[in-house]
C-alpha cells in the first residue's frame, strides 16, 4: 500500500519490507511439482490456497466462538462476516482446479500417491467447529503429535453451533424458533449470519464433488476412498441444523 503523494521508496537494505512481512520468498518456495506436467503447478497452488483459507476461516470462527462466550454479539458478527468473505474466495478457488481436463489431471495424479484432501487437518478443524465431531477423523494424523493434540483440543471445546445456542439461551430464548418468532433483531441477525456460513460450507462441498466428477468421474480416490461416491454420502449434510429446521416452522 502506498502512502503520501511522492514516489514510493525503491532502495532497501536486504529484501523489501513487503517480502519480509508476508514471507513471500518462503511462500513462493513451497510449490514443488513432482512431475513435468504443466497442470500440476495449478493443482498445487489451488491446494495451498485452500489450506491458507481453511486457516483463516478457522481463525475467524474461533474468534466468533470466543466473543459469543464473552457475550460480545457485535464482535462475533464481525468475525463471522469476515469468515464469509474468506469462504467466498474459498468457493471461487475451485475455479483453479475446474480448468483441468481429465487428461491433464491424469498426467500427474500418480505422483501424489495416497495423498488426499480427506487428510487435511485444516479442513478437519472446520468440521469440528461446525459440530461434526467424530474422534475417528483424527486417526489419519496419528504420526503427527502436535496436530493430534490440536484436533483433540478442538473436539473437547464447544462447537460454534453449541456456543451460539448457549448464547441465545443466556438471552432468554429456549431455541432458535423462539428467537425468530420473537423477532429479536440482533439474534435473528446472528442466526442469518450463521446460516450464511453454513450455506457457503455446503456449496464448497458440492463444488468439491463436481470437481471430482469433472476430472476423474467415479474412479476410486487416491486416499483409498471410493472417490466421488464417498463424497456423495456427506455432501448435503447441513451445519446448524436447527436454523434450517426453523424454515419449516415459521
Image: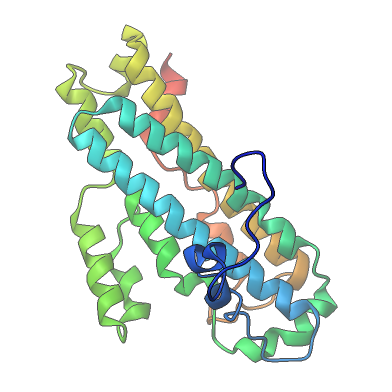
Most foreground residue, 217 or 207: 207
Q: Is residue 151 above or below residue 35?
A: above
- Label count reads 0
The image quadrant where one finds the C terminus is: top left
Most foreground residue, 84 or 171: 84
Q: Residue at x 33, y 51 (%)?
A: 129
Most foreground residue, 239 or 157: 157
Q: Residue at x 46, y 32 (%)?
A: 195
Q: Position of residue 230 (x, y in %)?
A: 55, 66
Q: Residue furthest top?
A: 182
Would you say residue 120 is visible in this rendering? yes
Q: Residue at x 61, y 72 (%)?
A: 227
Quarter residue 178 falls in: top left
Quarter residue 105 falls in: bottom right
Q: Position of residue 234 (x, y in %)?
A: 50, 56
Q: Is residue 124 above or below residue 36?
A: above
Q: Is residue 147 above or below residue 232?
A: below
Q: Position of residue 6 (x, y in %)?
A: 67, 44
Q: Residue at x 46, y 34 (%)?
A: 81
Judge from the rendering whether residue 87 lies leftward or rightward of residue 129; answer left or right: right
Would you say residue 198 is visible in this rendering? no
Q: Position of residue 4 (x, y in %)?
A: 61, 39
Amino acid at each position: 500500500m502506498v502512502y503520501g503523494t511522492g514516489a514510493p521508496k525503491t532502495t532497501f537494505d536486504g529484501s523489501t519490507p513487503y517480502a519480509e512481512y508476508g514471507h513471500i520468498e518462503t511462500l513462493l518456495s513451497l510449490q514443488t511439482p513432482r512431475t513435468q506436467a504443466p497442470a500440476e503447478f495449478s493443482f498445487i497452488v489451488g491446494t495451498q490456497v485452500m489450506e491458507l483459507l481453511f486457516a483463516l476461516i478457522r481463525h475467524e470462527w474461533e474468534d466468533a466462538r470466543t466473543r459469543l462466550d464473552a457475550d460480545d454479539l457485535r464482535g462475533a458478527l464481525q468475525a463471522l462476516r469476515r469468515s464469509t468473505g474468506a469462504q467466498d474466495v474459498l468457493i471461487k478457488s475451485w475455479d483453479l482446479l475446474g480448468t483441468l481436463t481429465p487428461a491433464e489431471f491424469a498426467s500427474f495424479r500418480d505422483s501424489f500417491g495416497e495423498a488426499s484432501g480427506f487428510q487435511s487437518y485444516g479442513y478437519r478443524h472446520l468440521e469440528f467447529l461446525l459440530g461434526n465431531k467424530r474422534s475417528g477423523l483424527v486417526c489419519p494424523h496419528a504420526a503427527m503429535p502436535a496436530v493430534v493434540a490440536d484436533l483433540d483440543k478442538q473436539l473437547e471445546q464447544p462447537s460454534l453451533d453449541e456456543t451460539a445456542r448457549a448464547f441465545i439461551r443466556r438471552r432468554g430464548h429456549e431455541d432458535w424458533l423462539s428467537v425468530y418468532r420473537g423477532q429479536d433483531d440482533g439474534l435473528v441477525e446472528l442466526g442469518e449470519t450463521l446460516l450464511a456460513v453454513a450455506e457457503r460450507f455446503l456449496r464448497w462441498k458440492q463444488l468439491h464433488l463436481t470437481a471430482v466428477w469433472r476430472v476423474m468421474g467415479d474412479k476410486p480416490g487416491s486416499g483409498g476412498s471410493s472417490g466421488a461416491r464417498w463424497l456423495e454420502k456427506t455432501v448435503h449434510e447441513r451445519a446448524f441444523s436447527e436454523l434450517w429446521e426453523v424454515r419449516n416452522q415459521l
